[in-house]
Amino acid sequence: MAKHDLIVVLDFGAQYSMLIARRVRECNVYCEVYPHDIPVEELKKRNVKGVIVSGGPASVYEQDAPKADPKLWTSGIPVLGICYGMQLLAKELGGEVKPGNKREYGKADLLIDDQSNIFAGLDSQLQCWMSHGDTVVGLPAGFKQLAHTDNTKYAAAGDPAKKIYGVQFHPEVVHTPKGIEIIKNFAYIICGCQPTWTTANFIEEQVREIRAKVGKDKVLLALSGGVDSTTVAALIHKAIGDQLVCMFIDQGFMRKNEAKKIDDLFVNRFKVNFLNINAAALFFEKLKGVVDPEQKRKIIGENFIRTFEVEAKKLGQIPWLAQGTLYPDVIESAVPGTTTGKVAKKIKTHHNVGGLPEKMGFKLIEPLRLLFKDEVRVLGRDLGIPDDIVNRQPFPGPGLAIRIIGEVTEERVKILQQVDDIVVSEIKDAGYYRKVWQSFAVLLPIRTVGVMGDKRTYLNTIAIRAVTSLDAMTADWARLPYELLEKISNRIVNETPEVNRVVYDISSKPPSTIEWE
């Protein structure tokens, strides 16, 4: 990657650490998330222009409270501490932190005492989002008060000479409307960063790097049709053209006409070497009689791998495998030895492309591993990928198979494909597709009595699921308008002869999951 000015977020276990990095990148400044205890020598090797110390659940007075490398405070690298980060820098530099007499959570009016530096160009009163119990009650030598609220005297403080600042509120969240301006001031004014982190620059750099890495070799990409793998395909094809081979394995559980749409996109629009492998018969055979959700997932994953291996061998020697690994995947897979377990626990190990085994003799190309999902969507648009793919809601790897409760048969898949098509089209037409995180239908293993055309029916039941979420870690059921739900229900029953009942799922995560299986 070409050299860009770099700001680093030190992760102290905050739920917002990745969000902070995303906000910095929105300022067109490159930002990465590092373990809280990374040595300052490492930061200097990377020529870091600024450090943001994140919030976190700990108290600075806990016996094992996480700390940064003590050399950070005298390194000369500009620092912005957020919430716990402010409390930590205040204590480490000789200030005083105490449990607040009155805890402060939620919106607060921030009164600016010094409209220079991090508050340059902002009004004297701002709305901000507080979430803290401890509070700074005594400033270190050289620091001055920059802002306050009714409950917090030092809502922001700083030492301009040392370029060390702290804010007790969260500028990274949307509930602090001018927070992005504060982050820009830190990046541009305090750190002296240049806004060179742009999609156009990224494409240009990756095209150059992929060409240099691959040479005249071929690259194989297992394509799912989602935004990540499609963007990888478009980017690598721009770099090496016909040296890219895309393989799409249709396991029979895709959405209505999806396999054809993917085929049309890559053959006719992008004109890439595209292999559409129809393996539906194999997958249906392997899933006969299977009802356990975990067993379904394992069978689908295993047979995807086996199919991929068989088909890949037919292509001869291809040394490179492309994957759609994203930056959150890299962070969540927490490399052992880089951080303390109490602060950054491994959330999950990510195996892309349906869990392809490591020992397949491929070298990896992961051109999106530095990007967040929203950045991938912007990149996809710039590469000419249609909006219906760029803005696609998350879709499970096993496809509709885990939205069919019970045995997966061709007949039941056809029913759900029809219903799913109705749900997605109506949600889109009503303008809710991008307002919710996911919206889909589930086919239940329940038949119920109904009356249609004065006759008794005994047919299938469909559950509609729609949730709002920021990151899928938690989710709430979406309050869709009754009129929209009514229209969806009417269409499903009228256009799908096998269904006579539609229900709406109003459970949140936790205790439920987003998907039913």
Image (spheres, rainbow, N blue to C red):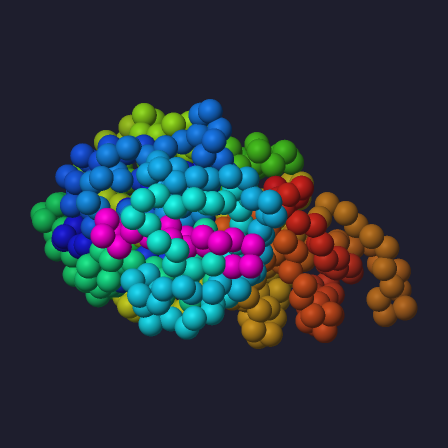
Q: Which x, y percent locates residue 81?
A: 37, 47
Q: Which x, y percent locates residue 370?
A: 28, 49
In this rendering, the answer to whether 54 lies above or below 492 is: above
- Magenta region includes residue 154: yes
Report whether 385 appears left or right of 204. right
Report whether 161 appears left or right of 495. left
Closer to us: 127 or 93? 93
Closer to us: 50 or 278? 50
**Residue at 27% in and 40% down:** 73
Q: Which x, y percent locates residue 394?
A: 49, 54
- Magenta region includes residue 42: no
**Residue at 88% in and 60% down:** 456
Q: Which x, y percent locates residue 112?
A: 42, 65
Residue 225 is drawn in which quadrant? bottom left
Closer to us: 299 or 112? 112
**Residue at 86% in and 70% down:** 453
**Residue at 44% in and 30% down:** 65
Residue 363 is drawn in which quadrant? top left
In this rendering, the answer to whether 112 lies above or below 467 is: below
Closer to us: 331 or 136? 136
Q: Which residues are magenta?
A: 149-167
Q: Please tell me how many numbered marks the rendered image carries.
A: 0
| Quarter in which the C terminus is drawn | top right
Whether residue 366 is visible: yes
Whether residue 355 is visible: no
